[in-house]
Image: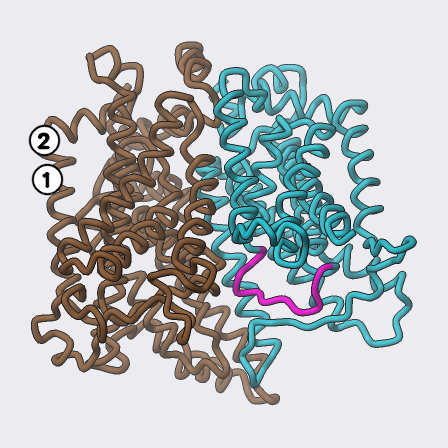
Chain colours: A cyan, B brown
Amino acid sequence: MLLTKYTLLYSMVLMLVALGGAFTEHSGVINIALEGTMTIGGLVGVLALVVLPAGTPAFTVVLVSVLAAGIAGILYTSLLAFASVNLKADQTIGGTALNLLATALAVVVVRRFNFGTQSAKLTYNNEPFLFDIGDLTVNVFLFIGLALLIISIIVMYKTRFGLRLRACGEHPQAADSVGINVYEMRWWGVLISGFLGGIGGFAYIVPAVQTWNFEVGVAGMGFLALAVMIFGQWKPGRIFFAALFFAIFKSMANIADSTILAALEWPKEIYNMMPFIASMIILAFTSKKSRAPKAEGIPYDKTGR
Amino acid sequence: MKRKNGSPWLGGDRLASIGASFISIIIGLLFGFLFLIVLSLINSGGEGFISVITNAWKYGFKQILMGGFYLPPISIGQEIAATAPLILTGLSVGFAFKTGLFNIGAAGQYTLGAFGALFCAIVLGLPWWACLLGATLFGALWGAIPGIFKAYLNIHEVITSIMFNWIGLYAVNTIMYGGGTGVMYDSTKTKVWDLRSLFPASVIPNMGLAAYFKNRSTTIAIFLAIVIAIVIYIVIDKTTFGYELKACGFNKSAARYAGISEKKNIVLSMVIAGALAGFGAGLFYLSGIAEWRPLDSTALPAIGFNGIAVALLASSNPIGTIFSALFISHITTGGSLMNSQYFPPEIADIISGIIIYLCAFSLLFKQMLMKKRGSQKLAVDLVDVTVKEPQQIDSFLPEEEVDGKEIDD
């Protein structure tokens, strides 16, 4: 039961963030900054949760804090978009910088928020996010996640926007030649990942615990999502299953001590390691026919056509 | 077209590189000051604007600017001690840059290096120089992995490095903790055994530096780091071996055409980069005051990522790395000396984060500087390079396709 609970939780987190990553990369921008985006989204979401007065209706609490997380993510990734699209900067370095910046920012803000104690922890009430279905406690992000998954599939494959976005990641010159604004599409790709990544970060922090130490950021979850995205070959449907698969390992790490798995006497770190090892193995076998967007990582320059 | 000016981290016009770094530093510091002012504004109980600025200066920014000199000699010793490992992670990232690779895995190699150093000291009881070699070996091993994946399977080194950073961290924590009964684990203090009291032979000697700076963490590590920087400079710039490695970074196809085995060189580059990061960890964890807490180490060591900032600021020049490491350690030390009641020390991390962000497009600064100096021709060259340069990143693609693209263009 516990395993189901955590698997559902983590799979939605990983899926949301990996979907965000897929949107960015389909537009042709490498997104290493998922980890940082999650941290900032989580930070702002939790702050909204803490600041909202007690007695606010549960629905409002959820709506406001989730939107706050998403919008914070958008604002933060706009830094990546600006650097990589407009200034044609190195996307990997830009992303790395944003990851480092995010944790530092979060810690500074939280320490200042806890004036007097300098603690980097925030404590909040996560009840509005949890529901009981029979014996199983699920959180609101299950529904948000599934809804966003369906929307993502539709947007990416059934709309003109999705087609154009993918064109920019495959062959921006061709896209430009038929009148698509490559810069604009790439901005969209990055900002969508900000929205999804921000919500993902919030979804990771809030449902499981009531206190979060921002010194650890989101503890590598963003990088795991990057692995999920690759494992899912940049396709939303596959990303869903990849996220589920990774989430099972991640949950096993969480509950290893309290279940039948304890009999194996494997340290929980083994389970933490497994998703990363699994993605490396898959990568090793699939590298020859990788489905990565072809123009990913290459800044687009109109004059370079 | 001249490819001499390659990408921002491959050197190019030295003066413009230094200028671009200074612009990044100044903007980074300005943002840091701005942050302090905002924090100071929140702290102020309706005081005037002047006192807000004064407080931000007096209790925060002054310390950052003065760094170790704020509280001599102790904090100078601290700054020097922190610089040594940073030089090495900077060299690690910079060396990989020079050969066209982005070693985001320095943090993981550093983690393995820490393990190697502590293992040699605690389990094998080796003297300090042998422990340093052990650290280097473990770092090199962890660096080899992304190199092999890149060379033989065409998987981008950034992806492999990121995955193996975490695998390394979890592995090291597991082995050190050993379920609470690991040989290296002191369960009464919930950390790895103390080197200074139990294995004094494994601690790097300080030759009186510790007494001079009244700070036990100051050892001869800084001199070792500088020596390594000079060695790397000679290897890269003065030897055929270094030239071959660099050639692979500039243009893989051309290097292959010239008979250079690029697969072997990719692996070698990453091995050396990993060895450097591992050595850096040795310098830090054998200083006698650093400790590893397997239960609390849930994040990768920041020093590995700060190495990226160091390398970028130095445009990957090994000698420049000494100074940029000194700078990063200067502001970090300064950050820790601020009045933490009002100004969290992580402000320094924000500054270095901003600096890395700015370095991502330092090419832009370089262009501006070059135009100012009136060397139009060089500027034109650089504009050309802006278009071509990304191919060195060659995305996360199998190499054949990228090569094809280069020809298309």
Q: Is residue A44 above or below residue A272?
A: below
Subunit that carries the residue with mark 2: B
Q: Nearer the viewer, residue A136 or A209?
A: A136
Badge 2 and badge 1 in a common chain: yes
Rendered residue at 24%/28% (across/down): B4
Quarter residue B158 falls in = top left
Q: Left or right of B10: which side holds A165?
A: right
Rendered residue at 25%/23% (across/down): B264
Please report contact status of discs 2 and 1: CB closer than 8 Å, yes or no: yes
Residue position marked by numbered label 2 in the rendering: B239
Q: Left or right of B260: which side holds A301?
A: right
Measured as percent of width and height from the top left, residue B337 is found at 36, 78
Quarter residue B272 falls in = top left
Of helix, strand and loop, which one carries label 1? helix
Q: Amino acid at mark 1?
A: Ile
Q: Which residues are magenta?
A: A208-218
Q: Nearer the viewer, residue B359 or A40?
A: A40
Magenta span has A210?
yes
Residue B323 visible within the image:
no
Work out how far the residue at label 2 is from the one at label 1, CA to CA, in angstroms. Answer: 7 Å
Q: Which mark is residue B155?
A: none
Q: Is residue B399 above or below residue B100?
A: above
Q: Amino acid at mark 2?
A: Thr
Mark with earlier residue (2, 1): 1
Residue position marked by numbered label 1 in the rendering: B234
Measured as percent of width and height from the top left, residue B53 is found at 47, 80
